[in-house]
Structure formats: C-alpha cells, structure tokens
Amino acid sequence: MAVTATHSQYAAMSDDWQMMEDALAGPRTVKLNGVTYLPKTSGMIEAESLAGTDQSPLTKEDAEKLYRSYKERAEYPMWVKDSLRTMVGLVSRQEPEIALPDKMSGIEENATADGFGLKELFLRVVIANLTKGRKPLLGEFDEFGKPYIATYTAETAINWRAESVNGRQDLILAVLKEQRLREGSDEFDPQYDDVYRVLDLFEGRYRVRLLKASGEQIGDDDFPGFTNKPLDFIPLVFAGSTDNSVAVDEIPLLTMAQSAIKYYQLSADYYQSLHYCAHPQPVITGIKSDEDLRVTGPMAAWTLEDPQADAKYLEFTGSGVEATRIAMQDARNAAAEAGAKVLDTGSQESGDARIARQNDQHSSLYSVCVTSAQAIEQVLQYIAIWVGANPDDVVFKVEPKFSQTDIDAAMLTILHNIVMAGSAPREVLYDALRKMGFTEESDEELDAKIEAGVMPQQVA
C-alpha cells in the first residue's frame, strides 16, 4: 500500500470538510465551485448541448451565460462564519486552568510553531472542532531543544491505525501530509511538493520518517526521545468534537452549512423566477420576416402594418415563487435550530432533562470546549514524559461557564444574522425561538410584547 493511501473514514469525510472550508470562505468561493453547489437546470444543460448547431440560435458563449446569470443572482448567506464568530466570542471569555512543570514553563506563552500561547491554541482547537470535528496535535521539539505543539488540519492527517494495547486503544501509525518548498523554486513564485511524515512504533520505539509521494525516503529514520529512554508511544492526539479517540467525530456546524447551501440553491430559483416575472417576453405574430421590431421598452412603439398582425406579452406568473420562498424560510429555520443545538449547554436543566433532550446530540459548544482542553492536556503530558517531568504535574482544564444570559444573547445574535436584519418575517424568528425552548408563546403574544415594549424591538 502506498504512503498516499487514505483511511476509510478520511475518504468518507473529505467532501464534508471541503464543504465547511468553502462555507466559511463565503459567497465568492461557493460560486467559484459552480455546479458542485449549484447544479444547472435541465434547460441550461439542453441549451448548452444544442448551442452552435442548426437546432439552436445560441452560440456556446450565449448558452454558458444562462448559467452564469443564474448563479450570479443566487444569494449565499454567511450563517456559518457569523455563528462561528459568535461562538468563539463566548469561548474566548473562558479562562483555562494551567499548571506546568518547571521544565515546560516556556510552553505556556510559546506553545506553537508560530509563537502563540496555550490559550490561543485552545481557541484554534475549538474552532477546528466546531468546523471540522478534528484537530491533530503533535508533541515536538525545535532546533533549540524547546518543546512545542505542532498543529495539523483534519485534511492533512490522511491515515492512522490503532491497536489494543493492555486493554486500551493506542495509536501505532499516523501519516501526516505536509508541503515542502521545492529546491530551486523562485523566491517570488514558490513551488511546493507534497511530503508525508510517517509516525509509527518500530520495535517498540517511536519512529519518524519523511517520505515522498513515490515512497522514496527523505533522510534517515528518526527516533525521538532520549538515548537511555526512547519514547514507546506516538505523542499525537486527535482532538475531536465528541471525544479524543482516533476516530473521526461529527462536525457540529455541518447542518448549518448544509442549510446555507440549500438556501443558496433555492435562492437561485427564487431570484430567477422574480427576474422572469419582471421581464415579460414580447411575442409578435402575422408580420413579415424582414420587419425589424427588435427594440422594446417604454420609449419604443411598434407599428404593425398588416391588420392580421398581433403583438402581446407572455408573462411569467411565478406560481411556484411562494413555495420556493417558504422553502428558503425553512432553510433559515433549520440553520437557526442547528446553531441552537451547538450553543446548547443545558445549564438550566436537570441531568435527566438534558439527557432526554440530547439523545441525538453530542457535540455542543460545552462538550467541544471540554474535549479540546483535554486534548491539549494530553499532548502536554506526552511532552512532560519526553522531557523527564512528572505528567501528573500537567494541568490544562477549561470548565466552561456560559450563563443563560450569554447563551440567549449569542443565540439572538446568530438569529439576527440568519433573519438578515428584518429581511425575513418575524414568524421565522418566533418559530426558531420556540424550537430552542426560549418561549412557548404564540406569534400573536410575541407581537403584543414587542408592541408593548416588553420584548426588545430589535429582536424582530
């Protein structure tokens, strides 16, 4: 098997990770992906297949413009990015409990390869877990002998294997994809080659190899550790949204991203229909073929010489526009509900009530914070063993303290973004609030509260 081979779970999740990447990047990236997120209509496909033939008056370029116009009219909402920003704002207020052995004191303020501290690393891990459900963390030493934590993305950890050791699942192989500057590359136009960092246990010792895509090894085998005490484990932790096992976890914000893509697709049809409604098609019958009546508009008039000639407009009634608008509203509601589930902390519920309501939900913001902190603590303990310190002296804990007021405010911020500052009716917000358990009141009761000033006007 080649070093480029990927784990079955990696292959299953690759499309979802790419969708999350594009969803966070925004409208420009989503639209550049063309038919990946917005398929062509059957009419557009037919027009392109016939373009340039005797069966169609359209050129290839004319036919392609049909899809470009369709795509440009579509609206992609920034629900995922706005919601992530709100959630990170909540997490950034949490203060980790940190304790380190003297031999590792410098890592608190200089924990990563780019010089960020442990608190900033924690935020990065939380963001990765919310958007990808995975963040690989590797214990390393720099050229000066100082420990740090090397971070990878979900997409760069392409393969792994764990085996049962003394009744527990231990990592015995991991393949991390990296990029290395190509020799002789221009300084103003750098070119990179893919290389693969292979971590495994060889004869009970932690081994690191660097391989090209062809399988050719770069340099010699490296056995990190001390001469008298080599490492007998791989100091790599897969931080996850649900737990920190090697298995790939669910993506908390995936449902919101899927709702945003569905809204984007529906909006293309919606605005296409509105475009047709606003531009009726003129039809003239009974005139000579050489008569020129191409100009239309309020400042132009046609004179039909033949008394049998007739002119009329074919107007698009748009009978399906309302159904499309309702479907777009449903997509908004689904996104709001997805955001509520991720924000849910259950701080005002009993244990039984929380379990009953969360049977199908495991990756709330609360649990993501806890597992992210546990992953960082685990890799710090690996480094402690590496430097000869007591791993029990390592503490990195975060006990999230989100007040109900914080959660309500954050959820309303997300809802405000989703409702798009009043572009959707109040009913969209009311329905989402009821689904989240914030209220059981009817639309009429909530309307009355707003009018009476009991409920803040800006909520609607």
Image (spheres, helix red, strand yellow):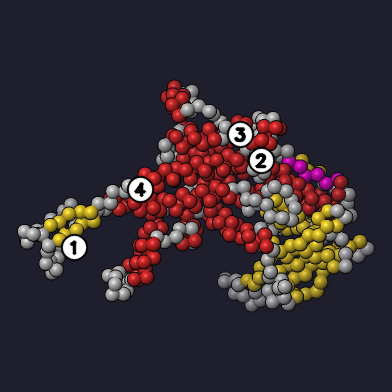
Image quadrant where residue 6 sits: bottom right
CA distance separating discs 2 and 3: 24 Å
- Identify the secondary structure beneath mark 3: helix
Q: Amino acid at mark 2?
A: Asn
Q: Amino acid at mark 3?
A: Asp
Residue drawn at (66%, 58%), measured in percent from left and top? 154
- Segment tinted magenta in the rendering: 393-398
Write down the residue under mark 2. 359
Whether residue 366 is visible, yes or no, is yes
CA distance separating discs 1 and 2: 64 Å
CA distance separating discs 4 and 2: 38 Å
Q: Are marks 1 and 2 in contact (CB under 8 Å)?
A: no
Write down the residue under mark 4. 320
What quarter of the picture does the N terminus occupy? bottom right
397 inside magenta stretch: yes
Asked whether, in this view, residue 26 is left or right of residue 244, the answer is left
CA distance separating discs 4 and 3: 41 Å
Q: Residues within 10 Å of mark 4 (few under 14, many from 20)?
A: few
Residue drawn at (37%, 70%), measured in percent from left and top? 49
Mark 2 or mark 3, earlier in chain = 2
- Identify the secondary structure beneath mark 1: loop
Mark 4 or mark 3, earlier in chain = 4
257 inside magenta stretch: no
Q: Are marks 4 and 3 in contact (CB under 8 Å)?
A: no
Eye-nearest disc, 2 or 3: 2
Write down the residue under mark 1. 294
Q: Are marks 2 and 3 in contact (CB under 8 Å)?
A: no
Asked whether, in this view, residue 12 is left or right of residue 228, the answer is left
Q: Which mark is residue 406?
A: 3
